[in-house]
Image (cartoon, grey):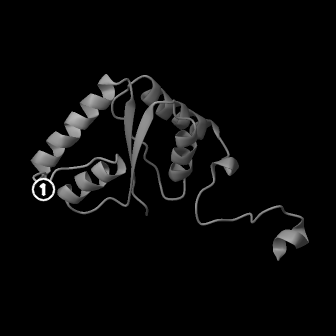
Amino acid sequence: MYEQFHGLSERPFSITPDPRYLYLSARHAEALAHLLYGVRENGGFTQLTGEVGTGKTMLVRCLLERLPERTDTAIVLDPPATRIEFLQTICRELRMRTPRWAENPSSLGAALNRKLLRTYAAGRRTILIVDEAQ
């Protein structure tokens, strides 16, 4: 209704962040560059923190659009409370077939580690994104 009245081609507000509308302030640009550097240069762990509503999820979505080829991603939204559920979620996101015996954190962690080593040996990167909604 208001799209037509205001001459808009689409709804201006959405529940989910849309990277097309990201305003890259100097701090956002720096954070995005840091995240991309961490992925491209095998930087190990990179953490993005900030207050509610500062654009963390939007930056992550922007990052996902700019990932190098040969990158596998596991995205965990609102991480589960237990360690085993968290590991199971990561494995599911990486499309791992986990054996039945991998029902405790240590065996599941070992299976995940083997998968990550195989992926790395094949020249692929794996990134884990944990986005804890407020």
Which one is in front, 44 or 9? Answer: 9
Percent of width and height locating residue 76: 37, 54
Q: Position of residue 25 (x, y in %)?
A: 65, 41
Q: How many marks?
A: 1
Res 58 visible: yes
Going by the picture, which residue comes out furthest to the bottom?
Answer: 1
Secondary structure beneath dot 1 equals: loop
Residue 12: percent from left, percent from top: 74, 63
Give the side of residue 75 with respect to residue 97, left or right.
Answer: right
Given residues 44 and 99, the one toward you in this image is 99
Judge the density around disc 1: few (<14), some (14-19), many (≥20) Cα neighbours within 10 Å: some
Q: Is residue 117 above or below residue 3?
A: above
User: For this view, does 125 lie left or right of residue 63?
Assistant: left
The quadrant of the picture occupied by the C terminus is bottom left
Q: Is residue 125 above or below residue 17?
A: above
Taking depth in this image into account, of 58 and 99 the one nearest to the observer is 99
Percent from the top left, x then y, of residue 130? Answer: 38, 50
Residue at 13% across, 55% down: 100
Q: State the image quarter where residue 132 is shown.
A: bottom left
Vertical arrangement, residue 70 with respect to residue 91, above or below: above
73 sits left or right of 81 in the view? right
Q: Is residue 46 visible?
A: no
Task: Say which residue appears at 10% left-offset and 46% top-offset.
Answer: 106
| In the image: residue 103, left or right of residue 96 | left
Residue drawn at 27 percent across, 34 percent down: 116
Residue at (32, 31) in percent of width and height? 119
Residue type marked 1: Glu
Q: Name the residue beneath numbered marker 1.
A: 103
Q: Which residue is more in the foreground, 133 or 41?
A: 41
Whether 2 is drawn above or below 70: the answer is below
- Quadrant in the rendering for residue 118: top left
Q: Quadrant of the N terminus?
A: bottom right
